[in-house]
Image (cartoon, coloured by chain):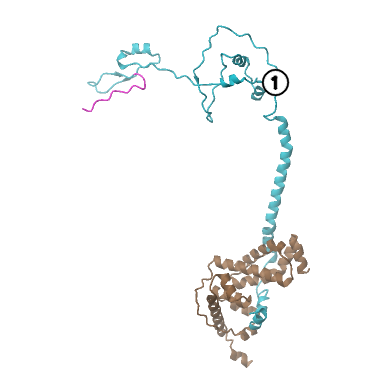
Amino acid sequence: MQLSELVKQAKRGSAAAQQGMFDRLADGMLMVCRRYVKTREDAEELMLDGFYKFFKALPAFRYQGDAALYAWLKRIMINECLMFLRRKNAFVIVSETVAEDIPLETDILDQLSAADIFNLVVQLPAGYRTVFNLHVIEGMHHGQIAELLGISEGTSKSQLSKAKALLQKMLAHKNITYVKRSTQ
Amino acid sequence: MSNEAHNDAYPWRDRLDGLESLPGEAGIDKAAAWEKLGRRLHGKQRRRYAAWYWSAAAVVLLAVLLPALMWRHPQKGSLVVTPPSPPLPAPVKNVVVKTPPVTPAAPEVPGRKQPALLPHPDTATGEALAAIPPAADTARSVSSRPIPSFDSMLARVTTAPVKKKIRVVHINELNDAASQAAIDEEYKPFKIKFNNPSGFASQTIVGSTAQPERPSKN
């Protein structure tokens, strides 16, 4: 069944349609949550909380395509994760206005599989990881990130720079270098 | 930065975003997860429906019982037709009725027993009230009791219990126990004996209010 049809029936309160939507979207949303929180158990709980809010708010949602629905659900999941991190004081971000712009070696990352990139990202500390996820993966501006996390724009930039620097170190540790790439 | 530009800067972003599981890792148990979520989503709804059913049942029950209760107990404001009272007995002359002292009506205190209403001796209504035998059932008595006139309503008094006067006897008037017994029938002699033989003689204390004489400090 099409997602649009499932949405229509789920809006009417059909439990079967809701379950169909859950089955279709749960895997992707779990990975979104796992990018933000470290443990899988926490990620599963947050995903369920997010789906609960999603289904509660679904009757008021106007369906405008699968991409819009997916973006909305993902935003709910990210908000749940950020609230969780804030509750746990998981990221204590020290204000730093000096942000050195470190270019991320995207070519190297492009060679890696999605699972490898995922494993690298989740190894970052919570503060770096959150800003990296919000900026690089979700495509948010530093102003938006600063507003969302209650930090300054400069702090957001410096956190991103440090996250990139750490990722470079991790890549170097894995012996993935430009030299190796150029020899291929 | 637009999304397209962002995608150009990070071309691996879509792959990471579309990742649904890690290789070699068991996926989520969707059936168990949905059971948990479904319980949260639909459990409360069922409870809400149950509350609706209970409230509807209560309303129906009230609708059935209320007319039945109203049929049994007429309202207080409704007019009650009393049967004509029996002829009054002939007034008895030269009968002296002792009346307790009249005191103004005290405000009703909750939990305090109200004294019985005594018939007023001077009015015919009082005698009529006295002639009516006490009814067993309160509800019946309310319906059969004649409405007293306005005068007798004003004369409604409360009786305060008469305090028993105790005769005050001066200490010098007390000669011995026998004479005291003649004065006061409830007199009970009470003797205090001191252990010291050379001490005081036996003393008699009359009544509980009499204070024993205190020895002077000097």
B129 is higher (above) or lower (below) than A180 = above
B160 is higher (above) or lower (below) than B4 = above
Residue B30, given in percent of the width and then of the height, sits at: 69, 66
Disc 1 residue crowd, few under 14, some 14–19, many 20+, Cα 10 Å:
few
Can residue B30 be seen at all in this image of the molecule?
yes
* Callout 1 secondary element: loop
Q: Which residues are magenta?
A: B206-218
Name chain A's colour: brown
Residue A10 on the magenta span: no
Residue B8, given in percent of the width and then of the height, sits at: 66, 83
Residue under numbered circle 1: B82
Residue in the picture at 68% in, 16% down: B85
Query: Hey, which residue is sitting farthest top in the picture?
Result: B94
Amino acid type, mark 1: Thr
Residue in the picture at 67% in, 74% down: B21
Can residue A41 be seen at all in this image of the molecule?
no
Query: Hey, which residue is sitting farthest front in the picture?
Result: B151
A83 is higher (above) or lower (below) than A179 = above
Chain of residue at mark 1:
B
Residue B109, given in percent of the width and then of the height, sits at: 52, 30
From the viewer's perspective, is B200 left or right of B158?
left
Name chain B's colour: cyan
The kind of secondary structure the magenta stretch mainly shows is: loop
